[in-house]
Amino acid sequence: MPLERQPLEPIRTRHRLRSLTDEQRDQLQEATFRILEEVGVCFPSEKALAVLADHGAQVSSGGQVVRIPRELVHKAMAAVPRSFRVGARHPSCEFDLGDGATYFTTDGCGVETVDLETGQRRPSVKADVAQMAHVSDYLSSVAFYWPMVSAQDYGQTAPLHELDASWNHTVKHVQSETLMGEVPARYALEMATVIAGDREQLRRRPVFSLLLCTIAPLLQDKEGIEGALLLAEAGIPVGLLSMPTLGTTAPATLAGAYAMADAEILSATVLLQLSSPGAPVFHSVMQGWAHPRTGNYVTYPLNARCRFAPVEMAHHWGMPSLGGAFGTESVEPGTWRSAAEVALDPLLVALSGAEWVTGLGLNRNFTLLHPEAILLDDELYHRARYALMDLEVSAETLSVEVIKQVGPGGHYLAQKHTRKYMRTAMIPGLGHQMDAAGKYRDPLEVARERLRSILQNYEPEPLEESKQRELTRILAAADKELK
């Protein structure tokens, strides 16, 4: 039976959970000012250094370390838009970061896939990006799409092929976390212009965005920052993501790691605003921990507190925030660990007020794709969404007249009121599905079955043939130039 795309169902709540006091937010911001003024950030890009120096930043003699006075930070940050419109191929999938909701995406960018049919673990390819875009297009929990794995069959142009696979299989906004360099950014901008129609439409309703990682501690990536300068000028939203590891690439205290990460993000934000005032940018910190015995990267230690404090830090600067969630360390989906590590994430990050959030569907620290895992995370997402919904209290829902009709010792099953509300009173999850014998089925088996059903019975709205041809032409030129 054909399936229809589910409407977006972001998390909406009037409740807020604060991790930081006003004094703590001010203290973190003051630390960021001091790091920018007294330590500086390395920008290995002549273009970036020229912009910063022209506006009064202090560039080290013969070097690439830039110290930014707080007056210049204040000036640049005054131009940052607090929210912006997120465009998409289909208008029903567009949203505004200022509407008070929290919008989630998939996780990315993994490097391995466990094949849904064979169960074999292998390097990811472009077809995997397309398959998960297909599934994500259907799910109401996924408001925009991160390519979940890398298109390793396309080498240097993999990020462009990931965009192509995404736009051909979802009508939702696409966010790239792998696009690096000015030349690839030009090709991506040309592709996005084809999708949007023209540059002005693309600026008004950008159909893709860039998430750029800084390099801890206190470094910017040359290729990444130069590509970001180009995209910001065109009005493409650019997110700055710091991923400090406590104890190795960052101080071993959360406050110190956050202050350092904030300085990395603010330095790049200042650059983009000086180059293109008013460019849409957003703030993101996703920290990890170094295991004290092995040095291994750990994302979910027992004391992973304050993981969503960076959302409040971003808002204190007047920036929208991309929150981090999901991404269990478990290699296998459907285990106690795979749920326990991430179960609180969608609830807490929504309560923190993050505008948009990563990332459903990956295992082993964001690197391994089991296709069915996205449906397990989808269920955790909706558990949080329902938990934060307001209780509807009205004469109809209070049901006093029905209670009078049934009376003490009666039964409600035959009531018209029951027939009206019973189907929505209890919504079964993956763990509530029964077999022919009336026994509960394995939720992982149910998830795989549902995933196959989506792939077989749901057809994403195809991209117009003329636009497909244009994307193919652009990719051919990119493959020739960059390979």
Image (spheres, rainbow, N blue to C red):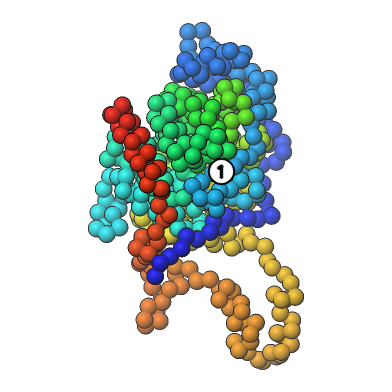
Q: Nearer the viewer, residue 420 or 59?
A: 420
Secondary structure type for disc 1: strand
- Residue in the picture at 36% in, 49% down: 130
Q: Hey, which residue is sitting farthest front in the picture?
A: 466
The number of discs equals: 1
Is residue 399 shown above or below 344? below
Is residue 389 shown above or below 416? above
Is residue 471 shown above or below 182? below
- Residue 195, position in %: x, y? 45, 41
Q: Nearer the viewer, residue 333 or 272?
A: 272
- Residue in the picture at 44% in, 38% down: 194
Q: Nearer the viewer, residue 3 or 202?
A: 202
- Residue in the picture at 51% in, 46% down: 88
Instruction: Locate residue 364 relative to residue 278 in the image: left or right.
Output: left
Res. 151 visible in picture: yes
- Residue 316, position in %: x, y? 67, 36
Q: Amino acid at mark 1?
A: Val
- Residue 369, position in %: x, y? 35, 50
Q: Which residue is mark 1?
A: 86
